[in-house]
Every structure is written in C-alpha cells, then in structure tokens.
Image: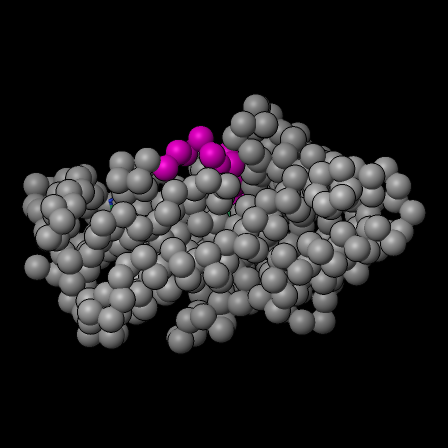
C-alpha cells in the first residue's frame, strides 16, 4: 500500500511526487512515456515559478524573456519590452525530465513507459491498474495525466470539448543566426478566438497557434496562413507539426476532488484561460494538493481543503481571465488598437504573468482605464456586459 500514487509525470505529477516524497510519504509515480519525452508546448514558464519551487530550473532554461513583439494579422508590429524578466523559455523534454529527476531524488518510486489503464476507488483505498497487468494500491491517487487524461475523464466526467485546440512546430534556427533575443512573438487576429506565437529557444523556434475548439474550425489552415505571413519565419522550413489540446479552465468545471482521488494540472482543466498558461499552474496545483494530502494522511484535514484552496487562491483570477479572453478574442482588432495606443496596459499585464498582480485587479484597472478614454464603442460594449448598472 502506497501513501500516494501519481498518474502522469509531467510538471503536475513530478511536482506532486517531489513534494509528497520529500515530506516522507511512500509515493509511486507512473507515466506512459519514457523520459525525456516530447510535449507539444510553447514552453514559456512565467517567472512566478521562482517563488513556487524550492529548486533551480535554470539548467533547463534556454532563453529569458522580457516581453513580446506583438502583431495584428502579422502586421502593425509593436514591441512591448520590460526591464524585468517575464518568463523563461524551455524545451519541455529537458524541463519535464529535470522535474522528474527531482521527484526521483526526493525518493519517489517511478515506473516509466507504462500506461495507467483503470482506477477504482473502493472507499478504503484506490486501486490503480496498469497496462502491463500490474495493479497497485494507495491511500490517495493524484490524477496528473494531462489533457483529456483518463483520471479526469473517467473519474470526474470532465469534458475535453471545453478546451482549445492547437497546432505546433519546432522550427530549427540557432540563436546565433537571429537578430533578436529575450522576446516572444505574439499575433492577435490570425485565428478566431485564439492567438499565434513564436517562442525562441536555443536551437529552435517553437511556433504555434491555439484557439477555442468550439469557435475555430480549420485550425491547420490558420496555422499555415500565420507561418507564411509572419516576418520572423520568412525563409524557414516549418517541418512537421503536432496537434494537441489545451484544457483551459471553464465555468462549471467539477471539483477536483472525488473520494480519494485528486486532480492536478491539465487533467483537471486547471489552465489559465486567457493565454493558456498551464506549466506554472500544473506545478502550483500539484504543490497545493500535496500539502493538503500531507494533512489528510496525518489526520489533520480532509481532501476537500484542496478545492477550497484553489477557490481562495487561483480560481477568481481564472474567472477574470475568462472575461479578458472574451474581450480580446471576440474583438482582437479593437484590443490591438487599445494596446497600440496604450502599451502600458500590456506592461501591467506582464505583472499579472509575473504573479505580482492578480488578474482580477488587473481586469478592474483595465476597465477603469478604458472607461476614462474616448474608446466609446468598446466602453459601451463593456458596460453592457460586465459593469453592473
Ligand atoms: C500547444 C500548446 C502550447 C502551450 N504553451 C504553453 C506555454 O508556453 N506556457 C505554459 O505555461 N503552458 C503552455 N501550455 C500548457 C502546458 O503545456 C500544460 O498546461 C502543462 O503541460 C500541464 O502539465 P501536466 O503535468 O498537467 O500535463 P502534461 O505535461 O501533459 O503531462 C501529463 C503526463 O501524463 C502522462 N500520461 C497521460 N496519460 C497517461 C496514462 N493513462 N498513464 C500514465 N501516464 C499518462 C503523459 O505521458 C504526460 O507525461 C501549452 C499547451 C499546448 C497544447
């Protein structure tokens, strides 16, 4: 009998395995892949990760980012660069491997290359069946098996439909051959209800597009149009592409605790819904869940303390991010005009990404700012939707 089994060892699972093992619990982590493994991702981790993890991620960081060069439909370039870092660009194979090794060093037992196939909560324990026929038992199961993960789907009935779809490519381009550094490229308007990006790494540009699964139909066509029009990709061979889901948070998502099963990261739709930031929130939710599990195993609290913590700490911000998405992605031209006229809005949003300001207070501030300017169309639209009479 393990204290905890962790299904999936991406940033969420490895962080949970690390904190649980380090506190002395008997932990088994299982992943269907063998690490290092590829993960389709922009790979930009916000700097707020520095205050979360108690070990260095710098060995996996390939570029420190200070801001972005924005475009609207690949035109009207607008550089908004800060003097302080906003994020770190990583390749997910190396980054996730680093986190997994930390979990292993902390004492977690790890099985790689074997899929979790079944979960049964008997009330007294959780039984986890693996694809190799083995079965293991634990007092708690941490579901960390990513987008459309089995644990979220089958135990909690979470719906992969409530997500964004994406296409990505890793385009070879060495840092020395570029005329820029320390910035992302972000394009609005290139796809309905979504955006496109180019995130520079040491030897690659991670290029991608993501949009609401329900609102963007032909995502591959939008991707092709973006890569053939954006100046930073001129003359480059885009190569093979990968499709993936971004399971953003949605209103009405079920509680991430059921019986002895706890969801962390993507499998629980715990991705910030404006930019699709999920790496930090995978680690954050995993660390929060781990501290609650420690209290639970020690008889000091129930597992319900975990959703209560999420409600107090991150979900109000996610709800404001949903409102921001509604504004930006339904009206990308209007939004772009606003940040062109007042780049300070994005500078302040960088503080939200850095974790120095909550998205809810940013959203209220941005609304007041908009109200004080002569952007009449936008103002009346906002008032009709969000400002109580
Ligand atoms: C195109 C794209 C771009 C993105 N860009 C960014 C970005 O720039 N910055 C950012 O912060 N976030 C980004 N995200 C979101 C980010 O990738 C995720 O939020 C993050 O990977 C979540 O981590 P996780 O550990 O929950 O899931 P994952 O990283 O997906 O890990 C899940 C693990 O579970 C394993 N697994 C799955 N099923 C099973 C099973 N049945 N049994 C055992 N193991 C299993 C998988 O092999 C995997 O290793 C992006 C996502 C996409 C799709």
**Is residue 286 highlighted in magenta?**
no
Quadrant where the N terminus sits is bottom left
Toward which corner of the image does residue 130 lie, by quadrant? Answer: top left
Residue 106 x/y as whole percent: 25, 72
Depth check, front residue: 177 or 349: 349
Seen in the image, is 41 located left or right of residue 34? right
- Left or right position of 282 against 191: left
Q: Which residues fall within the magenta stretch? A: 158-171
Point 39% across, 52% down: residue: 265
Callout count: 0
Left or right: 221 as drawn, with respect to 232: left
Q: Residue furthest right?
A: 374
Answer yes or no: is residue 133 visible.
Answer: yes
| Residue 162 painted magenta | yes
Q: Is residue 291 left or right of residue 360?
A: left
Q: Locate residue 126, reporting x and y percent.
A: 15, 50
Q: Is residue 231 visible?
A: no
């Amino acid at each position: 009998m393990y204290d905890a089994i962790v299904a999936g060892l991406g940033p969420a699972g490895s962080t949970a395995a690390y904190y649980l093992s380090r506190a002395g619990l008997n932990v088994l982590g299982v992943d269907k892949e063998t690490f290092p493994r590829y993960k389709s991702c922009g790979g930009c981790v916000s700097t707020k990760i520095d205050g979360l993890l108690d070990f260095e991620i710098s060995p996996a960081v390939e570029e420190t980012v200070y801001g972005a060069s924005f475009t609207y439909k690949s035109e009207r370039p607008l550089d908004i660069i800060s003097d302080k870092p906003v994020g770190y660009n990583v390749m997910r194979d190396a980054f996730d491997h680093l986190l997994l090794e930390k979990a292993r060093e902390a004492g977690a037992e790890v099985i790689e290359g074997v899929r979790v196939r079944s979960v049964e909560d008997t009330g007294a324990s959780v039984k986890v069946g693996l694809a190799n026929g083995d079965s293991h038992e634990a007092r708690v199961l941490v579901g960390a098996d990513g987008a459309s993960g089995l644990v979220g789907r089958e135990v909690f009935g979470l719906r992969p439909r409530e997500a964004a779809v994406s296409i990505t490519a890793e385009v070879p381009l060495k840092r020395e051959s570029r005329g820029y550094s320390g910035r992302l490229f972000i394009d609005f308007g290139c796809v309905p209800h979504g955006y496109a990006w180019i995130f520079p790494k040491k030897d690659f540009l991670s290029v991608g597009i993501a949009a609401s699964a329900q609102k963007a139909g032909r995502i591959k066509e939008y991707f092709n149009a973006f890569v053939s029009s954006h100046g930073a990709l001129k003359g480059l061979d885009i190569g093979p592409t990968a499709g993936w889901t971004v399971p953003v948070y949605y209103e009405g998502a079920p509680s991430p605790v059921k019986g002895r099963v706890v969801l962390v990261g993507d499998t629980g739709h715990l991705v910030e819904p404006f930019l699709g930031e999920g790496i930090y929130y995978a680690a954050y939710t995993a660390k929060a869940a781990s501290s609650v599990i420690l209290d639970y195993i020690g008889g000091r609290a129930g597992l319900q303390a975990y959703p209560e913590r999420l409600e107090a700490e991150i979900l109000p911000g996610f709800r404001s991010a949903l409102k921001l998405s509604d504004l930006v992605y339904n009206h990308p031209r209007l939004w772009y005009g606003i940040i062109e006229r007042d780049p300070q809005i994005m500078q302040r949003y960088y503080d939200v990404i850095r974790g120095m300001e909550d998205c809810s207070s940013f959203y209220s501030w941005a609304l007041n700012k908009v109200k004080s300017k002569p952007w009449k169309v936008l103002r009346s639209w906002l008032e009709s939707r969000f400002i109580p009479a």
